[in-house]
Image (cartoon, rainbow, N blue to C red):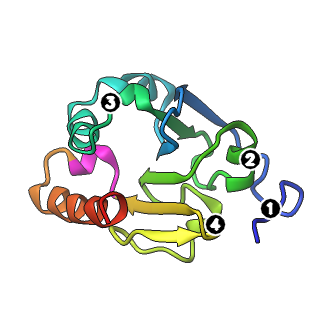
Amino acid sequence: MQPTPTQSPVAHIPFSTLGSNANGLVVLVRLSPEEFRKVPRNVFLNNLLKALRLIVEDVVLVNVEHPSYPVALCSLRQHLAAKQFLAFGKNLLDVAVYTTQPYEPVLLFGDTAFLGASEISMLEYDAGRKKQLWQAVQRMFMA
């Protein structure tokens, strides 16, 4: 059962978006507004999407604007038809905060897949973390 916007304590945490979400994939980050505007050009993210046969225009990027609280899934669902979430950072989605481990894809509410990973800036230059992420992405998207 998905909590309603009135039930979630973080239902009013602000977020901003870039993209159209044509394929139902949401990429969650927590960055400054200036850094967030640069994400569509991030080489690492574009290479990851290309490996999934996607381009950045196929996804929606969501920037969680609170410095420590997550955004509520129920709030996102009011704006996005999200089925898959790829989170780069900690504590980004309320329903995944206590139920997920980094690099372990899980199903939330039966139809929503979630995968948490390190921040994009940490992954870009860390081959070990990239490998962990790629193995997890394969389990989530190519199963």
- In primary-sequence order, the first of circles 3 and 4 is 3
Disc 3 residue type (three-letter): Ile
Disc 2 residue type (three-letter): Ser
Residue at the extreme front of the image, as rendered: 143
Q: Secondary structure at mark 3?
A: loop
**Label annotation for residue 75:** 2
Along the horizontal axis of the image, is 107 left or right of 15? left
Q: How packed is label 4: few (under 14 Cα within 10 Å), some, or many (20 or more)?
A: many
Question: Which residue is disc 4 drawn over?
Answer: 95
Residue 137 horizontal/vertical position (percent): 30, 59
Q: How packed is label 3: few (under 14 Cα within 10 Å), some, or many (20 or more)?
A: some
Disc 4 residue type (three-letter): Val
Residue 58 horizontal/vertical position (percent): 42, 31
Q: Disc 3 versus disc 1: distance between alpha carbons?
A: 32 Å
Q: Secondary structure at mark 4?
A: helix
- In primary-sequence order, the first of circles 3 and 1 is 1
Question: Which residue is disc 3 drawn over?
Answer: 55
Residue 41 horizontal/vertical position (percent): 30, 23
Along the horizontal axis of the image, is 4 left or right of 140? right
Q: How packed is label 1: few (under 14 Cα within 10 Å), some, or many (20 or more)?
A: some
Q: Are marks 3 and 4 in contact (CB under 8 Å)?
A: no
Residue 4 part of the magenta segment? no
Give the quadrant of the N terminus. Answer: bottom right
Q: Disc 2 versus disc 3: distance between alpha carbons?
A: 25 Å
Question: Which residue is disc 1 drawn over?
Answer: 8
- In primary-sequence order, the first of circles 4 and 1 is 1
Q: Quarter-wise, where is residue 96 in the image?
A: bottom right
Q: Nearer the viewer, residue 35 or 25?
A: 25
Look at 75% across and 66% down and name the residue there.
Answer: 2
Give the quadrant of the C terminus. Answer: bottom left
> The magenta stretch spans which residues?
118-123
Q: Nearer the viewer, residue 47 or 68?
A: 47
